[in-house]
Image (tube, rainbow, N blue to C red):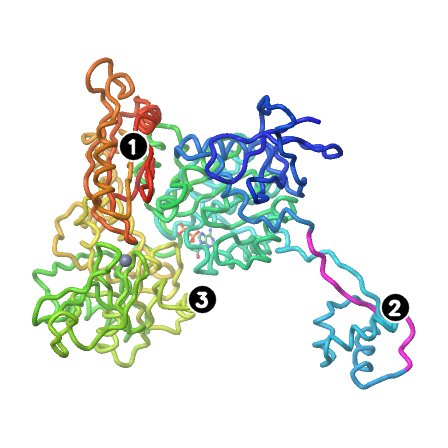
Amino acid sequence: MTAAPVLVPLPVDRPYTYAVPEGIAVSPGDVVAVPLGPRTVLGVVWDGDADDVPAAKLRPIAERLDGHIDQDMRRFVEWIADYTLNAPGIVLRMVLRVPEAFGPEKPVAAVRLAGAPPERITPARKRVLEIVADGLSWNRRALAEAAGAGVSVIDGLVDQGTLERIFLPRPPVVKPPRADFARPILTEAQGQAATALRDMVAAQAFSVALLEGVTGSGKTEVYFEAIAEALDRGRQVLVMVPEISLTSQFLNRFEARFGAPPAEWHSGITPRRRERTWRGVASGEIRAVAGARSALFLPFPDLGLTVVDEEHDPAYKQEDGVIYSARDMAVVRAKISGFPVILSSATPSVESKANAERGRYAHIELPDRFGAALPDIKAIDMRADPPSPGRFLSPVLIEAIRQAVTGGEQALLFLNRRGYAPLTLCRRCGFRFECPNCSAWLVEHRFRRQLACHHCGHAVARPNRCPNCDAEDSLVPCGPGVERIAEEAADLFPDSRVLILSSDLVGSIGDLRQRFEMVEKGEVDIVIGTQLVAKGHNFPLLALVGVIDADIGLATADPRAAERTFQLLQQVTGRAGRQRDGGRGLIQTFDPDHPVMRAIVSGDRQAFYAREMAQRERQGLPPFGRLAAIIVSGKSQAEAAGYAKALARAVPSGEAAGGRNGHGPIRALGPAEAPLAVVRGRHRYRFLVKAPRSADLHRFLRVWLAAAPKPRGSLRIAVDIDPLSFL
Ligand code: ADP
Ligand code: ZN
């Protein structure tokens, strides 16, 4: 009997050793079931030698299953574990998320005509027989339905020998895409960009390209050509799209170009479809996938290209569990397997921009918009043109909306705040509604008649009296959310059709996709949207974009506040006038001289990036230095604070901090109470680690965590490498 190392999807640092029973042969990558304590769990036979343990002490592998996790994926798991300072088993869990895919696949049960008619013919039987007379096989339920009979009628005919039961293979999840289905005629600049990308794909080696061009310049058309090249070469393709679950526009465009939609992969697809998609990707039957972050862990046997659309989007960062950037990990996966990655954006992250400037990424630019001219953007100085008291739309913006809707065009009002009002207070006693579990105000949702916490989901019905002073009708909403703007718009334009696009308003994903389609078809005049609308949607009739509060994101301690605001404003104003000239953007701000507002109004993107990079370089911030955050949390404030202090005492100095004696160049700042001090009842403290690019940040963190006391009880440590959130 031999032994094999098996990695289980649990917080363990290394594979456990199991005995391989007689009659089973396993090799690295095989998915197996193994006993663990009283349970049986999935695991993957790992590389390397098994531990030298006496055979009598080993428990045997219970079963070898269908799946296989190839060598590249195993290296990928190890790489992420190493980089994020997580146990490999925890990372493996993200790969084994579809356990149903490792059992035998259930075929579709069907019936067809096989023998003489039964002796007793009922009207229902007669109808069934008429249908199956064509000799084709029928799904049992579908046949019953078509005949207007119960399934028992079908089963009766099977018992009589008139019908026979057969099993059919499952139909494919999607048809294969065709590279040459509908080739566009590209402009000269687009053609050059497409050729450069095609060449990268043809080289079948690792490389990264940053595809940069204003919204509407044809980036999607151009990277479709790279996809066509990969498909032509028989390789699989992954396109990562933020919020893919919320809109069908991308899928429709892909289908129009390639004759079939890509397979979708995100949290909104049904378990049955997940299973079939997993299998289809593994077997190679599925050639193209459009997915969210987790699509990185699909078992592509022959991935030849990954496209990360809207590469700057913060939604690519997974903020809980294993904290990782799916954009960065897409690059890592491509490096391991040796194929190209395309990062596409109108407003690239400063990190990707710097990589392009340093020559580490190819920089492919599309200078002009296709068809229409870029929208004309102006700032509205809210000090000079304030709204009426209790209102949020400046007279300048109102007039522009009036022009748009009377001209039969659409207007979009953008405010990155869900609900009706971000804060509710009692005007008698000053009481404010706060979440009992988080350090956050409760947001009023008038539509649902609730006050809700956006961090933990806690919600209460909005009371009529103040819970503190018992005054009646004394509660006032403070500040606007999209629902309040919609109310104001409906009030000002009673004849216009107003629609809100916000992720929390609607029940199902289908509902939201439907709302997007209503806007596309022109069934809406004024759209009120959160950041959801800034993500690559094409609204053909949209002529005006009004930003309600452009300053919202700037008043934070986030080192990327300016970059984020620039990206969001540029993306959202870029929705205007995509199909026709004359698009307009109006930005309500109290600070029109802020560099972000100036860059948006002047359209001088490069100046903004140059300024932002110079500032980051001075401050040693990414990409000129590296950051990591350590977040300590616990159920009691005293415990969390005490543990944070103990951690502070263990901060390495000297060599581990990158220096020779005394303090090195790597510094751990903190602990400080987190800006979001309490989330879901957990008290939080943060450290921020700053390191020069040349220093070994990972070694510093490992030495530190090894020297720190182990967290006990409710205490937890989370490590966030390259943090995007500082809350
Ligand atoms: P981006 O991805 O840069 O925002 P898109 O690829 O979505 O740009 O292009 C914007 C719009 O212009 C789309 O409707 C697209 O179909 C159209 N378009 C771009 N280039 C061409 C072209 N060469 N021929 C026809 N339509 C084009
Ligand atoms: Zn809460």
The extreme front residue here reads 56
Q: Look at label 2 and name its amino acid.
A: Ala
The residue pinned by badge 3 equals 508
Mark 3: amino acid:
Ser
Q: Position of residue 79 (x, y in %)?
A: 46, 31
**Front residue (pair 134, 382):** 134
Q: Residues within 10 Å of mark 3 (few under 14, many from 20)?
A: few
- Residue furthest to the bottom: 123
Q: Are marks 1 and 3 in contact (CB under 8 Å)?
A: no
Q: To which residue does mark 1 refer?
A: 623
Mark with earlier residue (1, 3): 3
Neighbour tally class for label 2: few under 14, some 14-19, many 20 plus, Cα within 10 Å: some
At x 35%, y 32%, the residue is 355
Residue at mark 2: 114
Q: Is residue 188 left or right of residue 273?
A: left
- Which mark is on residue 124? none
Q: Where is 512 relative to 713, above or below?
A: below
Mark 3 vs mark 2, CA separation in Å: 44 Å
* Extent of the magenta region: 105-119
